[in-house]
Amino acid sequence: MAASAASCISLLVLVVALAAVASAQLSPTFYDTSCPRAAATIKAAVVAAVRAEPRMGASLVRLHFHDCFVQGCDASILLAGQEQDAPPNKGSVRGYGVIENIKTQVEAICKQTVSCADIVTLAARDSVVALGGPSWTVPLGRRDSLDANVAQANSDLPGPTSSLNDLVTGFMKKNSLSLVDMVALSGAHTLGQAQCQNFRARIYGGDANINAAYATSLKANCPQTGGGDNNLAPLDPTTPNGFDNAYYANLMSQRGLLHSDQVLFNNGTADNTVRNFASSAAAFGSAFASAMIKMGNIEPKTGTQGQIRLVCSKVNS
Ligand code: HEM
């Protein structure tokens, strides 16, 4: 009797321990049996979207970042009219329609199996590859949230006027992303565009550490007064259309577009990492890939948490 009670307890302990491991872990083979064609379907759709509009690759990478930094990588950003309308996202984050379109294609091959959160994560990796960047293996098995968190979108997404200290502290709170991870992830600004309202102060005297010719060239499409808030400039003025390490050489010549870019190279603690990534595309590529995996592992919902949404923009009814 005592022996069978003891073995019952050990079995229970084992089951609880296994459940804890299962809920904490993602796996690259998660859909190998349940939806073997998922990854190829997502990749083909991303390639088509990027071919139609190269900037979409940038937008999908940023969408993943803005998903993960708010209550983890759980597709909370995709729920219509919530985080999307928070100031750090509104009128700026793009790609919702592309993800919804991919979700429709994936639902057609595997009903309610692949989460929107995993689609966003794979789409970010596939975008980087489509634009000439490094590849990496994506751990999978995230589930979708039942809610969004507007307050956290406002507090935890870094803004373009952030100081180096703000960035280091803010990233450290997210799965312990280190200074090197943060500098590597900022290299995503080798892609995409920013609006005049996000760099106007920097080019009109707000920052001393800006290349004068670069500031002058930006002023043409970003007037100091009289509008133009949404006018765009490339985050990487040297090679705006491809994923490479030019972003870091730009910083070394004071051609960071945002204040939050240039703080990475300004006689501070990130300078050596910037120099390293500027001089070695391989060092940047491998640091970027490992930091993207770490960012993708921020507070995933697994096991019985959350749900697999049928449509990414709303929770299941
Ligand atoms: C370090 C802190 C960061 C700050 C303060 C920041 C801020 C910004 C801002 C203000 C924009 C322009 C938005 C607009 O004007 O509409 C932008 C664009 C972008 N960001 Fe960041 N960002 C940061 C880190 C990251 C990270 C970690 C990633 C991805 C790994 C990323 C990827 C992008 C991309 C790809 C774009 C261009 C998007 C497009 O063209 O649609 N950023 N970021």
Image (cartoon, rainbow, N blue to C red):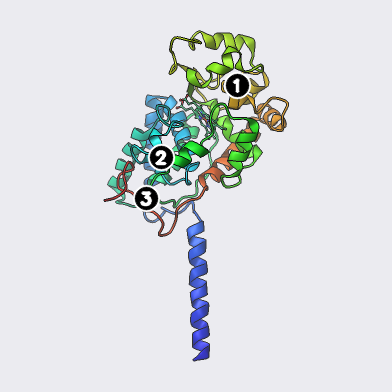
- The x and y percentages for residue 282 are 64, 33
The residue shown at (68%, 21%) is 252
Cα gap from disc 3 to disc 2, whole angstroms: 11 Å
Q: Are marks 3 and 2 in contact (CB under 8 Å)?
A: no
**Residue projecting furthest to the bottom:** 1
Work out whether mark 3 precedes mark 1 in sequence or the reverse, and give the earlier one: 3
The residue shown at (52%, 25%) is 242
- In the depicted view, which residue is nearer to us: 289 or 303? 303
- Residue topped by disc 1: 256
Secondary structure state at the residue bearing disc 3: loop
What type is the residue that disc 1 sits on?
Answer: Gly
Cα gap from disc 3 to disc 1, whole angstroms: 38 Å
Work out whether mark 3 precedes mark 2 in sequence or the reverse, and give the earlier one: 2
Q: Are marks 3 and 1 in contact (CB under 8 Å)?
A: no
- Find residue 146 and name its label: 3
- The x and y percentages for residue 75 are 41, 44
Can residue 286 be seen here? no
Mark count: 3
What type is the residue that disc 3 sits on?
Answer: Leu
Judged left or right of residue 28, residue 263 is right
Judged by depth in the image, the label closer to the viewer, 3 or 1, is 3
- Find residue 77 and name its label: 2
- The x and y percentages for residue 16 are 49, 69
- Find residue 289 and name its label: none
